[in-house]
Amino acid sequence: MHIYGVNINHNLYETLFKEMTQYVSPEKKAKIHRFRKPVDQVRSLFGDLIIRYILCKHYGLHNNEIRYEYQEFGKPYLPLHPHYHFNISHSGDWVVGVVSTSLVGIDIEKITDLKTDASSLALTAEEIEKFRKLNETERNAYFFELWTLKESYSKATGKGLSEGLNTLRISTDNGIIHILKDENTIDAYFQILECIAGYKFSLCSLSESLHKNIKLFPLNGFSEEAKAFFML
Ligand SMILES: CC(C)(COP(=O)(O)OP(=O)(O)OC[C@H]1O[C@@H](n2cnc3c(N)ncnc32)[C@H](O)[C@@H]1OP(=O)(O)O)[C@@H](O)C(=O)NCCC(=O)NCCS
């Protein structure tokens, strides 16, 4: 399993942005250009590029043999390479991606101030009770931790928010994180990645123990490094 993150809080030179778009599919390029805000264009482009980069660098694929298709709820997958699974997430200044040989989901969220009613969207009654006993700073951290854990699971299955995050309960036992639905524990393995201050960042794998190898890049550094692999 390989995880990479790109910090997009840097000026990306126009020429480099244009150059990097040539490494994605024409459909993706069109999608990127439909975003009005440059930040959304960069998020969309670099999520795609991170996955291409990992597949080329660590799994020996050529960029031109990488093609995405989309499942029922929008999860992209690799029809030509069904043994490899991936997932992408973006929030604030970060775009992150993971590739694995097992079904995997990843979610990053910038910790922000919460509107109090947000809790009922994502938390069970028991979790809301705990949430209400915390002070504001603790609440924000607790909420986004549970949110990213649950969303990483729902992104691993591909169901996304249609899963109903408030129907899933997170429980921790001796430092091991479990997820329960209707009080039944689901087979899923979690990891909270503590490498980015001010964010909650969670990973879920459906059939493999996880590990912590993650590499973080600035935008231009990633572009230069990735280009070398795409041109091979
Ligand atoms: C998947 C989903 C949870 C992502 O939420 P988000 O916090 O806005 O976005 P993130 O940045 O964490 O992840 C976005 C990436 O997840 C991936 N993704 C999209 N749908 C996905 C799904 N169903 N499962 C897993 N990953 C998915 C994409 O790669 C996307 O990035 P891209 O568009 O740049 O390629 C949300 O879009 C969703 O639930 N989609 C499914 C549609 C749906 O069920 N809607 C019902 C709403 S009640």
Image (cartoon, grey):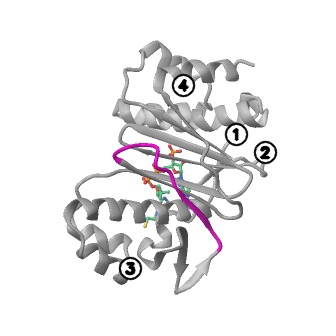
Q: CA distance from mark 2 to mark 1?
A: 7 Å
Q: Earlier in the sequence, mark 3 or mark 4?
A: 3
Amino acid at circle 1: Arg
The span shown in magenta is: 187-198
Q: Is 228 on the left or on the right of 113, as rendered?
A: right
Q: Earlier in the sequence, mark 4 or mark 2?
A: 2
Q: Which residue in the structure is indicated by mark 3?
A: 124
Q: CA distance from mark 3 to mark 2?
A: 39 Å
- Snapshot quadrant of residue 147: bottom left
Q: Which element type, helix, strand or loop, lies under badge 1?
A: loop
Amino acid at circle 2: Leu
Residue in the picture at 77% in, 37% down: 59
Check contact, mark 4 vs mark 1: CB within 8 A: no
Q: Which element type, helix, strand or loop, lies under badge 4?
A: helix
Depth order, front residue of 108/155: 108
Q: Is residue 124 visible?
A: yes
Check contact, mark 3 vs mark 4: CB within 8 A: no
Q: Earlier in the sequence, mark 1 or mark 3?
A: 1
Depth order, front residue of 30/147: 147
Residue in the picture at 37% in, 37% down: 93
Q: Is 7 on the left or on the right of 82, as rendered?
A: left
Q: CA distance from mark 4 to mark 2?
A: 26 Å
> Mark 3 or 2, which is nearer the eye?
3
Q: Which residue in the structure is indicated by mark 4?
A: 222
Q: Which element type, helix, strand or loop, lies under badge 2?
A: loop
Picture quarter with the C terminus: top right
Check contact, mark 2 vs mark 1: CB within 8 A: yes
Place of residue 212 in the rendered image (x, y in percent of width and height, measured from the top left): 60, 48
Q: Label for residue 80?
A: 2
Q: Is 144 on the left or on the right of 98, as rendered?
A: left
